[in-house]
Amino acid sequence: MKFTITREKLQEGLLRVGPSIPAKTTLPVLSNILIEAKKDGLHLSGTDLDIAVATTVAAEVDEEGAITLPAKKLTEIARELPASPVRVTSAGEQRAQVECGKSKFRLLGLPRDEFPSFPHVKFDTPWRIAAKDLHKLISHVAFATSTEESRPILNGVLWDLRKDRMRMVATNGHRLAKMDVPLAEEGGAAQAELIVPPKALEQIRRLFAPDDLVEIAKSENHLGFRSEGTQVFTRLIEGPYPNYEQVIPRENDKFATVDKIAMASALRRMSIVASDQTHRIRLSFGGGTLKFSVQTPDLGEAQDEMAVTYEGDALEIGFNAAYLLEILKYMPTDEVRFTFKAPERATTAEPVGWDDAASYMCLVMPLRLVD
Amino acid sequence: MTARRIAILSDAVANRIAAGEVVERPASVVKELLENAVDAGASAVAVEIEAGGKTLVRVADDGEGMGREDALLALDRHATSKIRSADDLVGVATFGFRGEALPSIAAVSRFELETASAGEAVGTRIAAAGGAVTALEDRVRQPGTTVTVRALFFNTPARRKFLRSTRSEVRACTEVVTTLALARPDLGLTLLADGHAVVEALPAGSLADRAAQLFGQQLAATLLPVDHASGSVTVRGLVQRPAEAAASGRMAYLFVNGRPFRDPFLVRAAERGYRATVPPGVRPSLVLRLEVPAGDVDVNVHPAKLEVRFRDRYAVEAAVEAAVHEALGPLAASAPYSAGSAMPWEHRAVAPPASAGLARDLFGAAGGDDAAPSEGEAPAPEGAAAEPPIHASELRVLAQLHQTYLLVEAPDGLLIVDQHSAHERILYERAMRTLTEGAAGGQKLLFPLTITLAPAELEAVEANGDLLGQLGYEAEPFGGSALIVHATPAPHARFDAERCLREVVADLAGGRFGGLHNRVERFASTFACRAAIKAGQPLTTAEMNELVQRLMAAELPAHDVHGRPTIVQLPLLELHRRFGRR
Ligand SMILES: Nc1ncnc2c1ncn2[C@@H]1O[C@H](COP(=O)(O)OP(=O)(O)O)[C@@H](O)[C@H]1O
């Protein structure tokens, strides 16, 4: 293997693949980056076995071949090299020499055969989706996944693809986020329900620019994304996803429209005195006001109040303040509309006047108030 | 000649005294003579027995002694120098006050009294048999008194028959001497049994030193200092570290105003102070010395003065419980890395975290954000002397070991924290607070859980329905053998509501944790155990910090709910020693 590459192209490729390489691993080859020199350029790949990232950068290849080299060292070297072409030559299965100007490195790697092969995903009939739509979905929904490990399904994001729209849903069983985005150009592939690890979605948000058109294809239990020279593969979480549609309330008959910033700052103030265990706070809606109160034994109590537009009978309801704050944080508009039914029933939140084709809602289950 | 001090009590006073047979066995002779010696201001007392005291008891003191007239009077019933009227009974400070012991002993033995008071050139020797004086003569000796009691019960064969084996009598005498030695650490005390030194206690500087003399250094190292005052009651002494308490061989010594007494209820109050740090059946050793105003305790209720009566018994029990609880609080109460290692923070308590409740935490609930825990100024706990208390902020979490232990740097060494036990302690205290102060509403679930249970488990759910509800569970039966759960507690971000409930129910049905004192404690500890993060769980740095902060904010950070330590400490001094730096 023998190739020459600009320092910038090498850095670019390493930057793309680097974050997919695990910091700690029991399988030494996983801390390495797979380097394949081919006629069409230099292919770089990394994986933690759950997610794999591969990218192609332009290089002058004199002799095809492949090797794996320690990702961290190679990245550090690339960062410090002078601004000259970089020449890489392999010597046998697991040695390579990197030369740049007067700098010269010999690195010890591992044979390419030891590198795990990538999941096989065929891109014959892919969905074609604008990266900006993916970004929007991911950044508004992925936060709601569960971090607790007993129900792996809830650790994933449901991605529901239809002919004319796609939807993402995430929940930890206490609160849920859901967004629909209409599909302008038809994807072509059939409809599907996929459960994707949020870690993979994070890579997608990082690797694809908003203007990219991303091709997505599915195999038995993997999903592949590709655009330009970059591909991401991820393991899918096996379903079925819980029937979330059934828990989205349709009969809520009390409505409050609130100022997001004002509500968030009141919630933050209340949280200071809320129980560190439950973050329990009490909201009272009635007339044109929303009253906040919190009472924590051994600590103290606090009240606050703000003006809201409220329709419906007066209501007292308890929440984990952290959940409400989180939802407000992801709401894309200054005003947010909440709907309620009763103190033990699900509450919804939606943006008001969002100038976007997408539709977004969050749902929170209340905390029981006792007394 | 020394002025006479002993007087015969009037019948009226004599009748007010809880009288009874004081001489039951050799040990009671030892006790009475020893107490007389202490009352006489002795600084060293030598006790000698033969055949468990059956053939000989001799008590020699260096106290103030008696003049001849007093020595003769002392053998008369109700002859005492210690009180004059019934009013003096209130708050009597001496052990003796009834003027009964010497005559009672003399009446059933061959008795000999040698005494000399400080100012006298010549002392006195009196001999008596069965109470009748057989000799009265001069005796030159050091100031002080020696009483020799031979052939106990020689004239009352019925009582002689009730004497136990020599071994058991020696044991009883030892117990008497030990008790007195704990009451008065400043006193030099020896007990010689058939020529063998059973107790050899030089005057000691502290109760802890005295305990080491009596029980050995190893056991003494498991005792923690108690120093507490509530209202007019002060409680000082030593209590055993929970992790080292055993199911057998406990020692419990109680003193009030220097006087030993028995009181199983007070011992129980002390055990309550341990809360759930010791498992059922385990009995920690303790030595507690109470001081109450003289008028608040009546010592004249029991013939052998073994029991006392408190005017405000509840206050005394509360003080004892609080004292023990407080003693277990400091970090010093955590288990040492090796027995007998130096304990540099012996007197450094963990500061009570005044405002740690404000801290936001990852262990609080799913989705909390990341404000740093705040640290409040806290007053130094009592008895913390000059050393400042250890603030939780002085602790630095270094690493997680084997996904089970946290390594924490403290100002004077290293703490090793068991992550599960620590979390269990935190959750236990929270659950107890919730269960005793009302209830916590649960987090409603989007997707109700359906849990299938065995009949015994369903029964356990029914029997503990109120407590489950208080903690935040909302469940209803579904079909014959299932439960639908609509709400659960949400104590931390890694909480697995379903598994926790299954395990709690299985534990309750299986009678695990069965011995704990009451149903609420049993339930709380079951829940805490099952809700806590497990060993083997990797934790983020933020979570580890949170856990340590929370632990330090707990009432009893150093002990888990099964009587195991949550913290093992490796003092810096110990490290220095091991590396040969000191
Ligand atoms: N070891 C002793 N040294 C000095 N005085 C003693 C000693 N033993 C007894 N006495 C005197 O003898 C009195 C009677 O003793 P005792 O019959 O034991 O009654 P009590 O101790 O209840 O007064 C005591 O009050 C004390 O004055």
Image: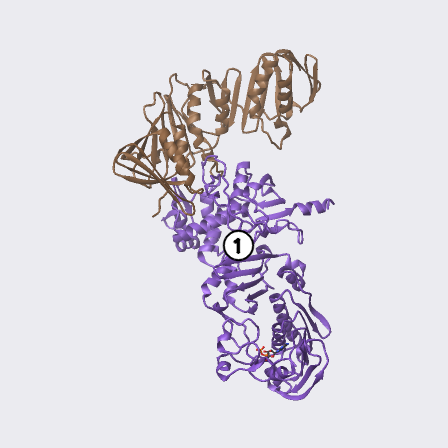
Chain colours: A brown, B purple
Side of B199 where B553 appears, left or right = left
Q: Where on the picture, by quarter, is residue A300?
A: top left
Counting from the top left corner in percent of width and height, residue A101 is at: 68, 12
Q: Give above or below for B240 relative to A246.
A: below
Q: For the point 35% across and 36% down, which residue is it?
A: A247
Q: Where on the picture, by quarter, is residue B215?
A: bottom right
Side of B160 where B16 appears, left or right = left
Counting from the top left corner in percent of width and height, residue B307 is at: 52, 71
Q: Amino acid at mark 1?
A: Glu
Question: Which one is nearer the viewer's eye here, A232 or B397?
Answer: B397
Residue tagged 1: B326
Q: For the point 52% across and 67% down, which residue is it?
A: B264
Counting from the top left corner in percent of width and height, residue B400 is at: 59, 40
Q: Judge the density around disc 1: few (<14), some (14-19), many (≥20) Cα neighbours within 10 Å.
A: many
* Label 1: chain letter: B
- Count all numbered tags in the image, as a single digit: 1
Please state the quadrant of the image where ligand 1 appears. Answer: bottom right
Q: Give above or below for A257 relative to B458.
A: above
Q: Give above or below for A221 relative to B57.
A: above
Q: Is ligand 1 closer than 8 angstroms to the Cβ of mark 1?
A: no
Q: Is residue B23 visible?
A: no
Dot 1: what SS?
Answer: helix
Q: Is residue A305 visible?
A: yes
Q: For the point 70% across and 16% down, which residue is it?
A: A104
Counting from the top left corner in percent of width and height, residue A299 is at: 42, 45
Q: Quadrant of the N terminus of chain B?
A: bottom right
